[in-house]
Image (cartoon, helix red, strand yellow):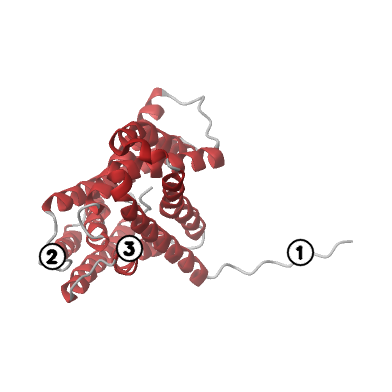
Amino acid sequence: MTAAPVPRPAARPFGAVGLVAAGLICQEVGASFAVLLFPSVGAIGMVSLRLAFSAIVLLAIARPRLRGHSRNHWLTVIAFGLALALMNALFYEALARVPLGATITIEVLGPLVLSVVMSRRASSWLWAVLAFAGVVILSQGSFGDLDPVGVAFAFGAATMWAAYILLSARTGARFPRLDGLAIAMTVGAVVTVPFGIATAGPVIFQPGILLLGAAVALLSSTIPYALELVALRRLPSATFSILMSLSPAIATTAGFLILGQTFTGLAFLAIGLVIAASIGAVLSASRAARGGLPDTGIGEPLS
């Protein structure tokens, strides 16, 4: 007769919070490493490396089933892959011109505004106004003079992040497990790799560049996604989204420590307003979801 198994203690929320924090740190460190590669391969070359290695890892893990899907399913996942590619391209083009902290702060507006719109509450627009006030302050020399082209790319990435969230939800409803994400990442890689090779040239195939590209893919996509997947099993979605809203502060810290990017005291105010607005929008969306409205998934990872 064997002894009854000892029940495992319930996972502590603090441990799950630590997983989310570790994922955010990995993401921003990965973005910092990507910036270091820009002089060698350019923004599009970096995007192609990240998506290609991320696709390889996801295909190996998920081994998606390709048969049995309707035309509508394939159109959805292809659209998801194109949105993923464009979002990353705009993000890295912004990073090539604007400091990491400023880029992330602007990009967070995408899911924030989506959350406000989906909450269908007029009062929720106050959070959007608060966030845009933060961005206005951000433009007042918080990170030095911001390149207007880079800012435009950051706003474009914000728009595509909102599209990414919507298409991610639709893809997840049509493909099991990680199948949809793996296929979408492959679509994104197929689209971007030719442009990456054309813009970067033969240097993109150098072993050192490939190794750094793989490291960026692991830090920016694979590791954060795995950590967040585990954390989501232990944390309420609203709590997870609030933690993800802290990404502008973590990005600013990573930019300062790794890239030597400086900022003024106004940056703290600007980032604080955007974080406060993000948290407020998450809480409003959570209340709306309890009332039967759809959850927007604000704060989901970039890829």
Disc nearer the start of the sequence (1/3): 1
**Secondary structure found at label 2:** helix
Marks 1 and 3 sit apart, C-alpha to C-alpha, by 41 Å
- To which residue does mark 3 refer? 247
Viewer-nearest of labels 1 and 2? 2
Q: Which residue is located at x 11 percent, y 53 percent?
A: 148
Marks 1 and 2 sit apart, C-alpha to C-alpha, by 56 Å
**Secondary structure found at label 1:** loop
Q: Nearer the viewer, residue 220 or 114?
A: 220
Label of residue 244 in the image: none
The answer to whether the residues at label 3 and label 2 have Cβ atoms under 8 Å apart is no
Instruction: Give the position of the N terminus as an image quadrant.
Output: bottom right
Circle 1: residue type: Pro
Viewer-nearest of labels 1 and 3? 3
When asked about the image quadrant of residue 253, the answer is bottom left
Marks 3 and 2 sit apart, C-alpha to C-alpha, by 18 Å
**Where is residue 14 drawn, in percent x and y?**
49, 72
- To which residue does mark 2 refer? 133
Instruction: Describe residue 9's horizontal placement relative to residue 208 as left or right.
Output: right
Q: Using the rendered image of the protein, determine whether residue 87 is visible from the camera's viewpoint.
A: no
- Vertical placement of residue 208 versus 59, above or below: below
Mark 1 neighbour density, 10 Å: few (under 14) some (14–19) many (20 or more): few
Q: Nearer the viewer, residue 230 or 93?
A: 93
Instruction: Describe residue 188's horizontal placement relative to residue 60 as left or right.
Output: left
- Vertical placement of residue 100 versus 202, above or below: below
Disc nearer the start of the sequence (3/2): 2
Mark 2 neighbour density, 10 Å: few (under 14) some (14–19) many (20 or more): some
Disc nearer the start of the sequence (1/2): 1
Label of residue 5 in the image: 1
